[in-house]
Each structure stands twice: as C-alpha cells, then as structure tokens.
Amino acid sequence: MPTILTHPAIPLAIGVVLGPKRISRRLLLAGMVAAIVPDLDVIAFKLGIEYANQLGHRGASHSIAFALAMGILAALAAPWLRAKRWAAMAFVSVACVSHPLLDMLTTGGLGAAIWWPFSDQRHFFPIQFIRVSPLTMGRFLGPAGITVIKSELLWVWLPCITLMLAAYDMRTRPPAFHVTPSGVFKPVAKAREMGFYGIAIALAMAWHFAGNGRLMGAIGVFSAMALIRYFQLRSIGPDGEPIVAIKDGKLLFRNPGFRRVVEPIPLRDIEQIKIYGQQGNRHYRFLLSRQGAKDLTLLQNNDAEQAVITFLRDALQEKVIVAKAPETFFEKVRGERA
C-alpha cells in the first residue's frame, strides 16, 4: 500500500481543483480522512485474521461498496460538512475509492477486493509502479521506507501538486487591465510568477531525490527561464504591457495582430482619433499629419475599451471623437453610422 501520508493527496488535489465554493474545508477534511480509513483493516492482523481473508487487509474495506457506504455517511452529515448531500456523498466516495485504486498500482502485497461483496478476488492494474509500503514500522523507518517515499513523491505527489498549481493559477489570474495616469495596461503578477518558479525548482528537487531527475540541470533551466523573464519584465515596465499608453511623446497602441506588437504613434502627428463600431469590437481611426489615416483595433473586453476611451479623452481631449454604435444591419456592415 502507499503510506498514510500519500493517500490523502488524491482528495486534496480534487478539492483544490474544484475550489472552496464547491468543496468546503470540512468536506475536504472528511474526504482526506475517508482516503485513510480503508487501512484501518490492518487491525485484522492483531485479531488473527489472515491477509487473504475478505475481512483482512485490502479486503472488504478496499471495495467500491465500502466507499459508497462512506459516501452515505457523509451525505447524512452534509449539513455539518457545509455541502449538499449529493456533493458530500460523491466527494467522500471518490476519496475513499481512490485508496484501493492506488493500492492496485503498487508493486507488492495482495491486490484490492474492489468488487466485494460480489467477489472477494483481489485485483491489480496491469501496470504497477508505486513501491509498496512495509507493514511494520521498523522496516518503514529503514531504507525500504525511503524508497517508498521517493516513489510516492514521484508518482502521486508530483502529479497532484501540478494539478493544484494549475487550478490555483486559473483562479488567481490577474485582472485583464489596470489604469494609471500614464495609460491602460495588461498587468503582470510578478510576485506570483516568481513564486511558481520557486515551486517548480522544489518539484525538480523532489524529482531528483526520487532518483529519476538531474537536479542541477533542472535548476539551471528554471534559473535561465527566470532570468529571461526578468529582463522581459524590465522591458515591459512596472505597470505591465501597455494596451494604450503615453510615453516619451508617443502614444503606444497595442496591435492585436499576429505579431501582437505595440505601435508607437508620435503625439504631434495625431490630428484626430475617431472611435467607432460596436462595444468589444471598436475600431480606432487615426488621422495623422504625415501618414494620412491609420486604422487599428484593440479586441479587448468592454470594460478595457471603455477605460481606453476615457484615457484617450483625458489625454487628447477634443481630438477624440466617439461615434455612436451602429444600430441597423447596414451600419454594422459599414462599421459606423451613416
């Protein structure tokens, strides 16, 4: 079996991925406990019950039926767990059944009686790659236990931590834009990004100590990535990447084309900016004293576009004209009102 320290990793990862709005802290804790409970059957050894008995280790308590029973108990306690009954039952059942599924991936012992009570036959998956944990404390504290911990770090904790980090990243994305006196920017979460590099290096170290990685090579790669990103952030500036900004006498305007470049337009050349089209798909026509007209688009959300319009009006005042949004089909085709 995997150790008691590793079985809770599966419900922990699921809970973090689904988020606190779906999985309360109490329900998450209940799921982590449910992932450990099946191994209470080791008491059978003290009672003289044989390993291969249906009530022995990896027997009835390692079945889908047992997991469903745990889920029913969770459903009854759903108000205390601060969850809906179906959610409590589903989460705790999945957490509990993850225990025998992990056991079926181990390299030793008997398989799990996953189909009990319909069958007391023990099962493994066709491929087993998680080192089985010793059943005695003396052996676990020796070299065999260290090998098991390394295996679990590699095959269980590393994938779970990766999933949790990905979920955290999705839920904590920085806002789409922020406004400063000098412009409207796409912000960069520098502290969070550097934190992820640190975590990535820690995972590389775990991979190394599991015996399957090259620590210095991984650290070198992540350090080079961090250094490159540092200079990119310096070139972007402390506020992030500009959507529309004014710097050194130029209007910086983000072009969402294939290259996604920021076009600099000298302020002295701008005679008029006409903004037309529907919200979320506005067009910006620059009338320039030296180059004639230039048409650009931002392809930003409504709030960002409104912030850009407000900024341009404050910065260029009477040079900015906002046309009314098209109302008829023909006006939409032309891109502006007749």
Image (tube, rainbow, N blue to C red):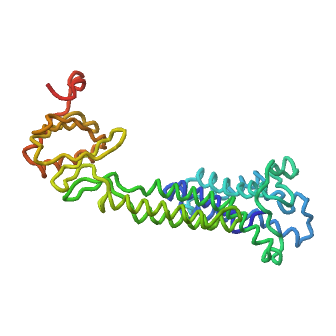
Relative depth, front residue between 199 and 54: 199
Please give the name of the residue rendered at 43% of the width and 60% of the height, measured from the top-left corner. 228
Q: Is residue 209 above or below residue 301?
A: below
134 or 53, which lies in front?
A: 134
Residue 77 in sight from this viewpoint: no
Question: From this viewpoint, which residue is outermost toward the top?
Answer: 330
Q: Position of residue 168 (x, y in %)?
A: 49, 58
Q: Nearer the viewer, residue 105 or 119?
A: 105
Q: Where is residue 130 in the image (x, y as percent from the top left)?
A: 76, 59
Q: Can residue 177 be seen in this view?
A: yes
28 sits left or right of 105 in the view: left
**Residue at 53% over, 59% down:** 165
Q: Position of residue 18 (x, y in %)?
A: 54, 54
Residue 153 sits in quarter: bottom right
Question: Is residue 127 rendered to the left or right of residue 160?
Answer: right
Q: Give coordinates of residue 66: x percent, y percent.
A: 76, 55
Residue sitting at the far left: 318
Where, quadrant-wise, is the N terminus in this rendering? bottom right
Q: Quadrant of the C terminus?
A: top left
The residue sitting at 70% across, 57% down in the picture is 96
Query: In the image, is 96 to the left or to the right of 47?
Result: left
- Badge count: 0
Compared to residue 287, the image places residue 75 above or below, namely: below
Above/below status of 99 relative to 258: below
Horizontal side of 268 relative to 157 (left or right) equals left
Q: In which quarter of the image is residue 37?
A: bottom right
